[in-house]
């Protein structure tokens, strides 16, 4: 069974069709890219999956479950984590808290437990703490645990954001332009990190990315959209030589 | 062991205060100032959950205080005093010790339910628009009570002192002082436990980036519900205590002026700092009393101080830090976060 199955997904904003008849099937342990010119509707697809928008038409099934009508936090609880185009960390709380809060859906204790500090509360908080520290250790972020995100370099903030998404323990990780604003050394680091996450956590990764070095070195499949419509779908080699893709990016040369 | 020092010290202070009042070493004036301080600490700390930690701008805190004050007063008057409209007392005066806490509890619950008026719109509304809703909630409460004849309407409502008298007749102690101090400790205790848990940290997460909170599996609606209801419930507790300290309430004392006063305390202390709210509430009460000689000019000086504060220290006395961030040695005795 495929992990994520999208059929005929369409989203209209008034007269504008942002996403038109979008189809994809993601299997377990795949790394797939979604590319296309600016304004092609890539982020809208991600927003539809994570529940920020509801589809006008079509269906989204995650692990066989229809996610239409769910609120974003409910979709996340099913095992879909994502990062954002611009970094959206909680900047006034330290890195450790950022990682801890992302485990909200499996707190496993009630408000009353929290007031009374019951045994259940203590064991659950310890568990949350343990998972957070393990993740920080694994992602090489331990030294920054008590720093505020806004005091960290941009590349490290990116890593913290990915770590925060991973603390959801997702089956599907959506990365929205992870390499945006990174210098070439950071991009190399990012490629290594994503590859490592993919191996270590056995997670399916779907990314929107403009930097072709990232896409080419990580993804086994690429989907290209323009004006909300899928224009190509295939392996990196196929995409590179596809005339429609080249036209969408570079324009028609018959002026 | 050392962590216990703070708790022991705190209760020692309470016992000392009660003893001072008991042996009339504190005159009634100081006693009432201390009790208002306690009420103000509860108000400021509870509003801080919404205005500080959650970053919303609630300016209707007085309304929830009003609900708590009237509901708990109604309970004790029904139970322990004779009233023209409500008839003879239902319970014997010996039960006043149980009756008052129950009445305070019912008052808080009623205020928490009233908090829904703001909590539910907050799911879709933020910022200035929500502030207007809170303002409206304040007016709804005041106008409703102004039109309720059985609680005296604009003339106010009294009879709560019978309960306090019952208790003092049974055992001669300054009972209201004890209740106010315990209410204050309870408020800080419950709020600190909430904001230091991973569950409670969902509240500042909403403040700092609501979309990120929702996508990172924080049920933002649920968190807003908890924050608003906890905040208004504790305001109701403050209202109940205030009503029983004074023995008389009227709707005007809970209007927008009161809400503003509490807001000033929160901004004075620092958003998102519990010790800041407590310190600010105490210093504000002292300041109000100290400037009493200025008479009406007090209301020129205090807003002026507010302007200066916003100009030179907009984050308040403490910012979002706690006492232990300024005096790390305190950490040995008590974990503030």
Image (cartoon, coloured by chain):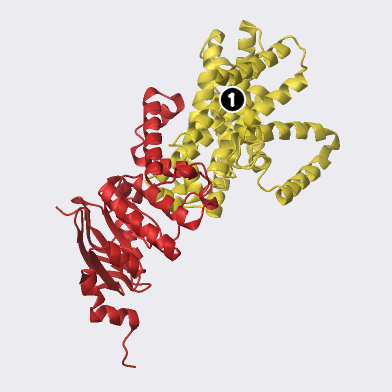
Chain colours: A red, B yellow
* In this view, B215 is above or below B295: below
Q: Measured along the vertical axis of the image, is residue B6 above or below residue A38? A: above
For this view, does B155 lie left or right of residue A230? Answer: right
Residue A130 seen: yes
Is B198 positioned to the left or the right of A23 in the image?
right
Q: Farthest residue to the left: give it.
A: A1
Residue at 26% across, 50% down = A199
Q: Residue at x 49, y 57 (%)?
A: A154
- Residue B13 in the image: state x and y as whole percent: 66, 17
State the residue lying farthest toward the right.
B293
Give neighbour class at mark 1: few <14, some 14-19, many 20+ (Cα, 10 Å): some
Q: Which residue is mark 1?
A: B332
Q: Quadrant of the N terminus of chain B?
A: top right
Q: Nearest the camera: B206 or B238?
A: B206
Q: Nearer the viewer, residue A194 or B223?
A: A194
Q: Is residue B201 above or below residue A89?
A: above
Q: Position of residue A106 (x, y in %)?
A: 33, 38
Q: Chain of mark 1?
A: B
B258 left or right of B292 in image? left
Image coordinates for residue B171, horizontal then vertical, percent: 62, 6
**Residue that sits furthest to the bottom in the current view:** A255
Badge count: 1
Classify the position of the C terminus of chain B by image quarter: top right
Q: Residue at x 56, y 13 (%)?
A: B96
């Amino acid at each position: 069974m495929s992990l994520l199955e999208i059929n005929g997904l369409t989203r209209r904003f008034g007269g504008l069709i942002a996403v038109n008849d979008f189809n994809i099937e993601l299997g377990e342990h795949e790394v797939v890219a979604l590319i296309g010119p600016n304004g092609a509707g890539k982020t809208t697809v991600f927003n539809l999956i994570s529940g920020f928008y509801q589809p006008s038409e079509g269906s989204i099934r995650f692990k066989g479950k229809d996610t239409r009508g769910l609120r974003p936090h409910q979709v996340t609880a099913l095992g879909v984590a994502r990062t954002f185009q611009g970094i959206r960390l909680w900047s006034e709380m330290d890195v450790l808290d950022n990682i801890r809060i992302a485990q909200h859906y499996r707190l496993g204790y009630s408000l009353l437990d929290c007031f009374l500090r019951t045994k259940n509360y203590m064991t659950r908080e310890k568990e949350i703490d343990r998972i957070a520290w393990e993740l920080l250790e694994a992602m090489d972020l331990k030294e920054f645990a008590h720093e505020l995100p806004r005091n960290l370099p941009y590349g490290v903030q990116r890593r913290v954001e990915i770590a925060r998404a991973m603390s959801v323990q997702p089956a599907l990780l959506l990365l929205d332009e992870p390499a945006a604003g990174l210098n070439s050394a950071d991009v190399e680091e990012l490629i290594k990190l994503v590859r490592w996450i993919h191996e270590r956590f056995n997670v399916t990764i779907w990314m929107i990315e403009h930097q072709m070095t990232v896409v080419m070195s990580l993804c086994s499949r690429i989907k290209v959209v323009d004006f909300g419509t899928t224009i190509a779908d295939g392996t990196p080699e196929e995409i590179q030589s596809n005339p429609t893709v080249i036209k969408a990016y570079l324009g028609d040369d018959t002026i | 062991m050392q962590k216990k020092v703070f708790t022991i010290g705190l209760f020692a202070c309470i016992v000392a205060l009660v003893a001072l009042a008991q042996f009339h070493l504190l005159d009634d004036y100081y006693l009432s100032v201390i009790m208002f301080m306690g009420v103000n600490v509860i108000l400021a700390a509870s509003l801080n959950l919404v205005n500080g930690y959650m970053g919303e701008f609630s300016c209707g805190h007085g309304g929830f205080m009003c609900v708590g004050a009237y509901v708990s007063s109604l309970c004790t008057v029904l139970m322990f005093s004779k009233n023209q409209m409500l008839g003879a007392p239902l319970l014997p005066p010996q039960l006043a010790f149980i009756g008052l806490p129950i009445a305070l509890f019912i008052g808080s619950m009623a205020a928490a339910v009233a908090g829904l008026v703001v909590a539910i719109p907050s799911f879709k509304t933020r910022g200035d628009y929500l502030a207007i809703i809170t303002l409206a909630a304040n007016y709804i409460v005041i106008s409703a009570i102004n039109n309720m004849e059985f609680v005296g309407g604009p003339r106010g409502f009294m009879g709560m002192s019978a309960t306090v008298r019952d208790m003092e007749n049974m055992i001669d102690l300054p009972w209201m002082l004890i209740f106010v101090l315990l209410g204050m400790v309870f408020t800080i205790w419950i709020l600190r436990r909430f904001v230091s848990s991973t569950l409670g940290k969902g509240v500042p997460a909403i403040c700092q980036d609501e979309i990120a909170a929702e996508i990172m599996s924080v049920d933002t609606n649920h968190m807003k519900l908890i924050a608003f209801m906890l905040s208004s419930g504790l305001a109701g507790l403050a209202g109940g205590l205030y009503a029983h300290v004074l023995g008389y309430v009227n709707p005007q004392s809970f209007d927008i002026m009161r809400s503003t006063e509490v807001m000033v305390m929160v901004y004075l202390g620092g958003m998102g700092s519990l010790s800041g709210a407590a310190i600010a509430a105490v210093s504000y009460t002292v300041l109000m009393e100290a400037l009493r000689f200025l008479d009406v000019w007090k209301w020129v000086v205090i807003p002026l101080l507010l302007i200066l504060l916003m100009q030179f220290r907009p984050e308040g006395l403490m910012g979002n830090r706690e006492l232990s961030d300024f005096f790390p040695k305190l950490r040995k005795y008590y974990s503030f976060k």
